[in-house]
Amino acid sequence: MQYTLVYSINKESSPETVYINLTNACTNNCIFCLRSQKDDVCGSEMWHDDNYTLEDIVKQFENYKPSPKQVVFCGYGEPFLKKDMMKAFAQYIRENYPEIKIRVNTNGHANAIYETNVAEEFKDLIDEASVSLNSDNPKEYDEICKPNIKNAYEEVKKFIKACNEAGIKTYASVVTGFDNEHNINVENCRKIANELGAEFRNREFISNGY
């Protein structure tokens, strides 16, 4: 079986965006996450055991011709948990395809995990960071995201600010419409995002995913 390390969410032979599925590990267990409901994205099997090399990612990426306009680190886990591999592939893109925009979709725990300013490490490697804020308060965040790190909500806010200060175009996002129990205060989240120097995105939950 060949692991899906690079995939797209449409059936075009040359999509404008491809996604890099670095790991299935995550420091959150979000109640809306589709990984608990299905194993694939648009037919691409997402589960793997992290047993791969940089060359494996490059090989799958090079199957997409002409080259995409954007690469996004996003899969069934938290990309920064494979920080070194992420950095290596981002450097590969920068060196070989400088015109391609690089984005990461992240839960915002990286600085807390590594106890260093990871955002600063990636300031020349990532163009955009989309950070999952998911609530305007820590109690609701913990209920929704079920993090396994301490003070996770505050760490997310710190990471959003750190990305902005590193010169990375930063978005803070929430997911809405995934159940009837959580009525997320979108406007408060927007205000928090803006105060941290980020733009805001409200992502409507897609029940069956892509």
Image (cartoon, rainbow, N blue to C red):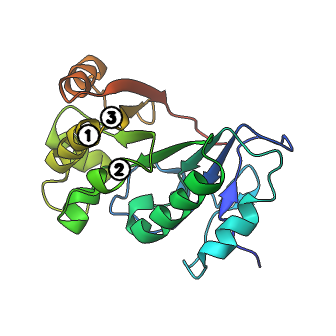
Q: Is residue 195 above or below residue 137?
A: above
Question: What SS does tag 1 mark?
Answer: helix
Q: Is residue 37 visible?
A: no
Does residue 79 appear to the left or right of 148 in the view shown? right
Instruction: Look at label 1 and name its amino acid.
Output: Ile
Residue for badge 1? 160
Residue 23 appears at what percent x and percent y?
51, 67
Question: What SS does tag 3 mark?
Answer: loop
Question: What SS does tag 2 mark?
Answer: loop
Residue for badge 2? 107
Closer-to-camera residue (164/146): 164
Closer-to-camera residue (94/135): 94
Instruction: Look at label 3 and name its amino acid.
Output: Glu
Lower position in the chain sequence, tag 3 or tag 1: 1
Does residue 60 appear to the left or right of 137 in the view shown? right
Lower position in the chain sequence, tag 2 or tag 1: 2
What residue is shown at x 16% (from left), y 36% (from top)?
137
Q: Is residue 56 above or below residue 46?
A: below
Q: Is residue 201 visible?
A: yes
**Which quadrant: the C terminus?**
top right
Category of crowding for the residue at label 3, using alpha-carbon neighbours closer than 10 angstroms: few (below 14), some (14–19), many (at least 20): few
Residue 100 appears at what percent x and percent y?
62, 42
What residue is shown at x 64% (from left), y 63% (from top)?
46
CA gap between label 2 and label 1 equals 10 Å
Q: How many marks?
A: 3
Lower position in the chain sequence, tag 3 or tag 2: 2
Closer-to-camera residue (116/31): 116
Instruction: Look at label 2 and name its amino acid.
Output: Asn
Res 7 label = none
Residue for badge 3? 181
